[in-house]
């Protein structure tokens, strides 16, 4: 009798271990897919915003394709809160040109972070908007760039 109980216990333990390992593997794959989708969306949205602010439309179509592909993947596999924040951002315009769009984008990034395991508003006190939406770092100098351009231009004329 004890042999039968041991055999049944071993089979149950094997099935439970297999189920837990499969679930963990699926969760890991889903997390990788979510991270890639979030990264692609944020990258394409950032490139589009910078291009539009600089007046360039050279790669806009390609970035729009990547953006919409990532949006579809987020809607398919993203956390429900992320999907809700994405829809809100999209409804606000998604161009990052107006304040309400920037606020919706900031919320979207915070919700993405929370869905990946970070604390919900761990960046709330930081100046994230400045870091996200300033085109150049504070040490960037238009004057240095302009003087460099002028000296090269003067050399070419001589």
Image (tube, rainbow, N blue to C red):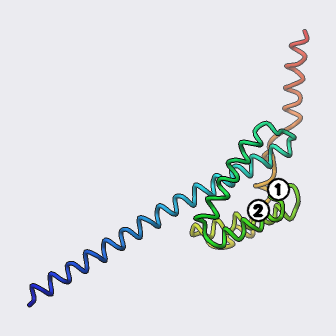
Q: Indicate the position of residue 62 as horizontal and vertical percent values.
A: 71, 42
Q: Write the residue at 87% across / 62% down.
A: 99
Residue 55 lies left or right of residue 105; in this view the side is right
The quarter of the rendered structure image containing the N terminus is: bottom left
The one nearer the camera, 77 or 102, is 77
Q: Write the residue at 41% across / 70% down.
A: 23
Q: Write the residue at 74% across / 46% down.
A: 47
Q: Indicate the position of residue 59 as horizontal and vertical percent values.
A: 75, 39
Q: Indicate the position of residue 31 as horizontal and vertical percent values.
A: 52, 63
For label 2, the residue is: 105
The one nearer the camera, 143 or 93, is 93
The quarter of the rendered structure image containing the C terminus is: top right
Residue, far bottom = 1
The one nearer the camera, 158 or 68, is 68
State the CA–CA distance, disc 2 to disc 1: 8 Å
Whether label 2 touches label 1, CB < 8 Å? yes
As drawn, the label of residue 96 is 1
Residue 96 lies left or right of residue 110; in this view the side is right
Q: Write the residue at 79% across / 66% down.
A: 104
Q: Indicate the position of residue 19 as horizontal and vertical percent values.
A: 35, 73
């Amino acid at each position: 009798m004890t042999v039968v109980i041991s055999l049944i216990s071993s089979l149950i333990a094997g099935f439970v271990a297999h189920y837990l390992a499969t679930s963990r593997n699926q969760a890991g794959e889903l997390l990788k897919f979510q991270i890639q989708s979030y990264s692609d969306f944020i990258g394409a949205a950032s490139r589009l915003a910078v291009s539009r602010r600089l007046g360039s439309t050279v790669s806009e179509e390609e970035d729009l394709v990547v953006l919409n592909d990532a949006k579809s993947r987020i809607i398919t596999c993203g956390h429900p809160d992320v999907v809700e924040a994405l829809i809100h951002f999209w409804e606000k315009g998604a161009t990052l040109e107006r304040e309400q769009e920037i606020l919706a984008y900031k919320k979207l990034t915070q919700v993405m972070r929370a869905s990946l395991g970070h604390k919900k508003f761990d960046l709330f006190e930081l100046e994230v908007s400045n870091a996200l939406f300033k085109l150049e770092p504070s040490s960037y100098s238009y004057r240095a760039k302009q003087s460099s351009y002028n000296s090269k231009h003067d050399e070419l004329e001589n």
